[in-house]
Amino acid sequence: MKKGFMLVEVMIAIIMAGILAAVLATMGYYTLIQGNTLKQQNSKTMLEVIRSRLLNTAANPDNDSYFELLKEVNSTVPVVIGLGKDAWGRNIYYTTYDFGTHNVNATYADTNSSISPNANVLGRLVSLGEDGILDTDENDSMAQNDDIMLEIGIGETNHLKLYNGSEVTTQTRGYNSAIVALSTDPLPAAPINGTILFLRDTNVTKIYDINTTSWIQISP
């Protein structure tokens, strides 16, 4: 009888140990899932903060009527921005595009190589996600696999710089775009349809019509 009781006790102990191990494993799994979900959300927030800082530092160093973002450093965010890593502690992939006159500028965007198939994109930020592998390239219009992507449109830059307004979403990258120049300044050869042009020396406002490929005066 004593041996029988000992066998039952051992079996019960083994079963309880198995149940406990299963519970702990399940808890660990869900903790990992929750941790990665939180890191994904935090990485999205970091991309938004970096985007805001890049917009704030945008400038027109070429005086060609196009704002430019700070140039990437080996495809990473410049140190001056203050943030450059995602929630996993990895460098955020960063590329820029210069819509205006191509030049060799040490600080601001100077490349005319395409960074996105989407229109009017000045810059692109990509977090490599949980797996740490960059799956999104310049031919992808949206983030691939577990990558997290945020694009910066030319309309966003102009909106902030000219109106000191709040940020606009990347979906409106082709709108809220404006140019402030002198009547003697060279103008972009192919601006965005609906772009507003204000000539400071004559106080004339024009809008670009892509159908007629011309600037139409709307005031005064």
Image (spheres, rainbow, N blue to C red):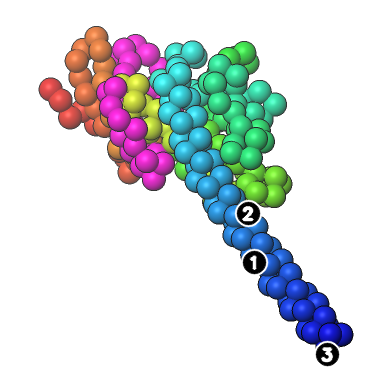
Q: Residue furthest bottom?
A: 1
Task: Identify the mark nearer the N-term, 2 or 1.
Answer: 1
Q: Do callouts 1 and 3 mark residues in contact (Cβ within 8 Å)?
A: no
Magenta extent: 163-189
Q: Nearer the viewer, mark 3 or mark 2?
A: 3
Q: Which residue is mark 1?
A: 23
Q: Tell me which numbered mark, 3 or 2, is placed earlier along the sequence.
A: 3
Q: Is residue 88 left or right of 165 when viewed as pictured?
A: right
- Check disc 3 and give the amino acid type: Met
Give the crowd class for mark 3: few <14, some 14-19, many >=20 residues within 10 Å: few
Look at the picture and state if 39 lies above or below 75: below
Please tell me which residue is depicted at 65% across the width and 44% down the height of the picture. 128
Secondary structure of the residue carrying numbered label 1: helix
Indicate yes or no whether the magenta region holds residue 52: no
What x and y, as percent, mark residue 1? 83, 90
Q: Residue at the spot x=60%, y=21% of the render?
A: 78
Specify the farthest residue to the left.
220
Above or below for 63 versus 116: above
Q: Secondary structure at mark 3?
A: loop
Residue at image point 47% right, 38% down: 45
Q: CA distance from mark 3 to mark 2?
A: 46 Å
Marks 1 and 3, Cα distance to the nearest angstrom?
33 Å
Rendered image quadrant of residue 76: top right
Disc sitting over residue 1 in the figure: 3
Q: Residues within 10 Å of mark 1 (few under 14, many from 20)?
A: few
Q: Which amino acid is tagged 1?
A: Val
Q: Quadrant of residue 166?
A: top left
Q: Using the image as rendered, state which of residue 45 and residue 207 is in the foreground.
A: 45
The type of residue carrying mark 2 is Leu
Q: How many marks?
A: 3
> Residue 177's mark?
none
